[in-house]
Amino acid sequence: MPPAEASENRALDALVNVLLTIGAPAASWLTVPTVNVGIPPDSVPSDAGALLYVHHVRTEAIPAEVGRAYHRNRAYFHVYGFVPDRDSGGPRLLLNLKADVLRAVFAAEGSVTTLFGQPFFPGSFGYRDDMISAGMSAGVQELTLDLELSHTQP
Amino acid sequence: MLAEFGVPVEWDGHEVKGIRDEVDVELLSGEGASFAGHQTSVLVKTGALPNIAAPTTILVESRLYRVARVEQVDDGALTRLMCAAE
């Protein structure tokens, strides 16, 4: 049997599953985004509604505590959100998309903790006006997950 | 230039000639990530579409675009309309 994938990949898969809960049923959410993994090679479409792109950014070691012999890492993920900037309403819609992301992350705390011993923790969110000239508002939400590494499934 | 390369641009009852450019440009970069956007711009003679301002919509060769930004270029003789497909 092949070994388990990298812990960051397993966490990324879990995060994608969390984000896929957004929008169903539509009445319970502010947005109905399309969830994508990784960075698209092509242009982000401005007429495709709300879009999410999630990727692993980096992993940092968490120093071990005195007397404890385990390995812990903090994995950082960025969730990029894009919304059409119709009638200059993009920034407001983007914040609603961010709120849906956080709502989904908080709702999944139990299931993620069962898998990894910790839930995803939301970090900073930043609005980006770089895509305005392409008709979109954009923003990035940081999420972290602390992972205790096993020697056989790092 | 506009007469030779221009295509029909319609807005608020006016019909003028404008040069449409469509390019993919890397617009947003972050940690380990870069995103490209599809930029559409339409260059018209300044004043040809009086008082046009974003947000509004224009018709270019029968296709509807949302105007995201209006900016005068060079010496102000021309105005560039930054657009997105509607």
Image (cartoon, rainbow, N blue to C red):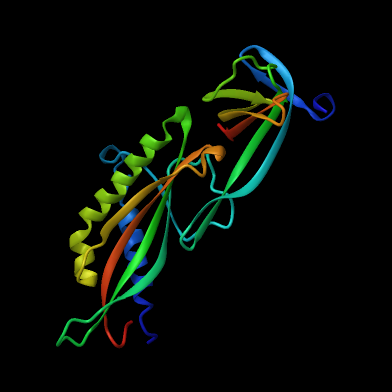
Picture quadrant of residue A28: top left
Q: Which quadrant of the figure contains the C terminus of chain A?
A: bottom left
The answer to which quarter of the image holds residue B41 is top right
Question: Which residue is at 47% across, 34% downward?
Answer: A85
Q: Residue A150: x percent and y percent? A: 27, 84
> Is residue A31 visible in the rendered structure shown here?
no
| Residue B13 image point, x, y percent | 64, 11
Q: Quadrant of the N terminus of chain A?
A: bottom left
Give the image location of residue B1, x and y in percent.
Answer: 83, 28
**Location of residue A52 with respect to A27 vertically, above or below:** below
Q: Residue furthest right?
A: B4
- Residue shown at 34% from the left, 75% from the top: A7
Q: In this view, does A53 lie to the left or right of A76?
A: right
Q: Does A139 sit above or below residue A36?
A: above
Q: How many marks?
A: 0
**Where residue B55 sits: x, y (%)?**
51, 25
Farthest-out residue, top: B13
